[in-house]
């Protein structure tokens, strides 16, 4: 199986900073540490309400990642404001996500069937600017087909339902995993690149990494939480090792 990239989402370093209105901890410092510890790229979600990552964080991350030649995956709602910011920064990748202000986190994937007329033009404009466009969707074959039809290069499959089920001891976990595997297989068949993310921890990473079409995982909240106990580099090193146990290491 091919090498599996790890994108580390540093949003929740900013959540902790913002809880006190302080200047620390700095998500850019976390991004640099994450890269040193084995992250292949950095993911950040500039939410419309700016509850964690700020515009200044994105400016600083863009500079640091460009200097290091490492990819920024810019998670964004499908709005004209976020599109303008993406087109100004031209990140390596943009991941389009649904966003509701009242939600605690991104609770489900985009509905690309209902939202086609809203999302498709944004996918087209970002892709035309050279940004690799990903749509965050639930593990649903119709959503995969809709992503393909609107010209997305990548689908990121929402792994939250599977990860929650494992944590809750819910017997439907196996069903959620099969659905992820089927959606990944269909996306691969259609020529889409497949990513996965949301809620992944040390227990759930290996079954997800075992889905052969998945080439990138984006992981945040668990790693930042684990960093409180063992440090961010150690948390990332351990996650990377679990991924490598399933997929093998990158060729030197
Ligand atoms: N991928 C996407 C598209 C997301 O919205 C998120 C959450 O911001 C993640 C990955 C990371 O999820 P978690 O923080 O639960 O690891």
Image (cartoon, rainbow, N blue to C red):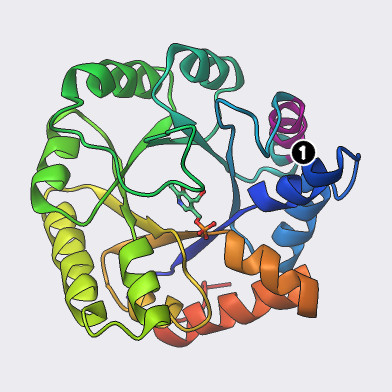
User: Which range of residues does the magenta coloring cover?
Assistant: 56-64
Camera sees residue 28 = no
Which quarter shows the C terminus?
bottom right
Q: Position of residue 105 (x, y in %)?
A: 49, 48
Q: Residue at x 66, y 71 (%)?
A: 236
Q: Is residue 103 left or right of residue 39?
A: left
Q: Position of residue 143 (x, y in %)?
A: 15, 44
Q: Is residue 90 magenta?
A: no
Residue 246 position by quadrant? bottom left
Q: Is residue 123 above or below residue 176?
A: above
Q: Position of residue 14 (x, y in %)?
A: 74, 45
Q: Residue at x 45, y 81 (%)?
A: 248
Q: Is residue 58 left or right of residue 110?
A: right
Which quarter shows the N terminus?
bottom left
Q: Is residue 79 above or below residue 207?
A: above
- The foreground one among 250 and 183 is 183
Residue picked out by circle 1: 64
Q: Is residue 235 above or below residue 83?
A: below
- Number of labels in the image equals 1
Neighbour tally class for label 1: few under 14, some 14-19, many 20 plus, Cα within 10 Å: some
């Amino acid at each position: 199986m091919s090498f599996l990239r790890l994108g580390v989402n540093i949003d929740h370093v900013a959540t902790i900073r913002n809880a006190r209105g302080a200047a620390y901890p700095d998500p850019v410092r976390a991004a640099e540490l994450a890269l040193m510890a084995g992250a292949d790229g950095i993911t950040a979600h500039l939410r419309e309400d700016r509850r964690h990552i700020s515009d200044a964080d994105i400016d600083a991350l863009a500079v640091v990642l460009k200097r290091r030649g490492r990819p920024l995956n810019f998670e964004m709602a499908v709005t004209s404001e976020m599109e303008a910011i993406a087109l100004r920064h031209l990140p390596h990748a943009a991941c389009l996500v649904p966003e509701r202000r009242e939600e605690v986190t991104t609770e489900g994937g985009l509905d690309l069937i209902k939202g086609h007329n809203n999302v498709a033009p944004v996918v087209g404009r970002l892709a035309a600017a050279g940004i690799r466009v990903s749509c965050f969707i639930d593990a649903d074959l119709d959503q995969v087909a809709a992503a393909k039809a609107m010209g997305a290069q990548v689908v990121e499959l929402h792994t939250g339902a599977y990860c929650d089920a494992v944590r809750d001891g819910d017997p439907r976990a196996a069903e959620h995993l099969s659905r992820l595997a089927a959606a990944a297989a269909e996306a691969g068949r259609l020529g889409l690149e497949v990513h996965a993310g949301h809620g992944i921890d040390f227990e759930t990473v290996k079954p997800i990494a075992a889905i052969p079409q998945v080439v990138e995982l984006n992981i945040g909240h668990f790693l930042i939480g684990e960093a409180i106990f063992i440090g961010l580099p150690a948390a990332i090193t351990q996650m990377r090792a679990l991924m490598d146990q399933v997929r093998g290491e990158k060729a030197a």
